Amino acid sequence: MDELPRTGPLPRPENPDQAREILRQEAFPAPDVQLVTLDATEFTAICPRTGQPDFGSVTVEYVPAERCIESKALKYYLWSYRNEGAFCETLAERIAGDVVYAVEPKWVRVRVNQNVRGGIAIVAVAERGERS
């Protein structure tokens, strides 16, 4: 897929690597803003040990340089993890790296909140760059 459709339903992502390319392609020139925060409150991935779904949320906070993340592309990108087995900590690290790849921000923080399962909630945070 070269780009996301402008209207109608989103196609299902093939995998996170393919969705990462869409995240980069759909980025747009950054306006004069100092901080952008995107909250995705309906995030799902798969536990790599049990195969059970892990539900939670993802917050991406960044200081733009030249480009910004398009929200529909982020939704598509995060959807690609729905069938992907990954630990919460790995997800935070990978998403932060993919945001850097897509828009090269001055600074980014990704916070993955995994809902309570088995009595334990997990929060993992990954940062890249320097926040000035």
Image (cartoon, grey):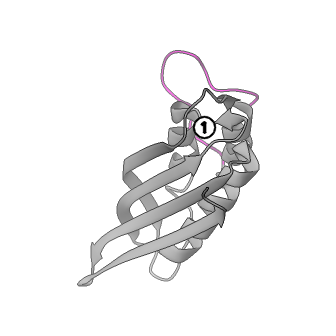
Q: Is residue 56 left or right of residue 59?
A: left
The quadrant of the rendering that contains the N terminus is top right
Mark 1 nearby-residue class (10 Å; few <14, some 14–19, many ≥20): many
Residue at 41%, 54% (x, y): give it: 43
Q: Which residues are magenta?
A: 1-14
Q: Nearer the viewer, residue 9 or 121?
A: 121
Q: Is residue 87 visible?
A: no
Q: Residue at x 69, y 60 (%)?
A: 97
Question: To which residue does mark 1 refer?
Answer: 69
Q: Chief secondary structure of the magenta span?
A: loop
6 lies left or right of 115 = right
Q: Inspect the image, locate mark 1, and give the three-letter code of the amino acid beneath it.
A: Ile
What residue is shown at x 61% (from left), y 69% (from top)? 93
Q: Residue 63: where, in percent of width, then height?
A: 59, 47
Q: Quadrant of residue 70?
A: top right
Left or right: where 31 falls relative to 44: right
Q: Is residue 96 visible?
A: yes
For this orientation, the residue located farthest to the front is 132
Q: Is residue 121 magenta?
A: no
Q: Is 12 inside the magenta-drawn segment?
A: yes
Q: Secondary structure at mark 1?
A: loop
109 or 57, which lies in front?
A: 109
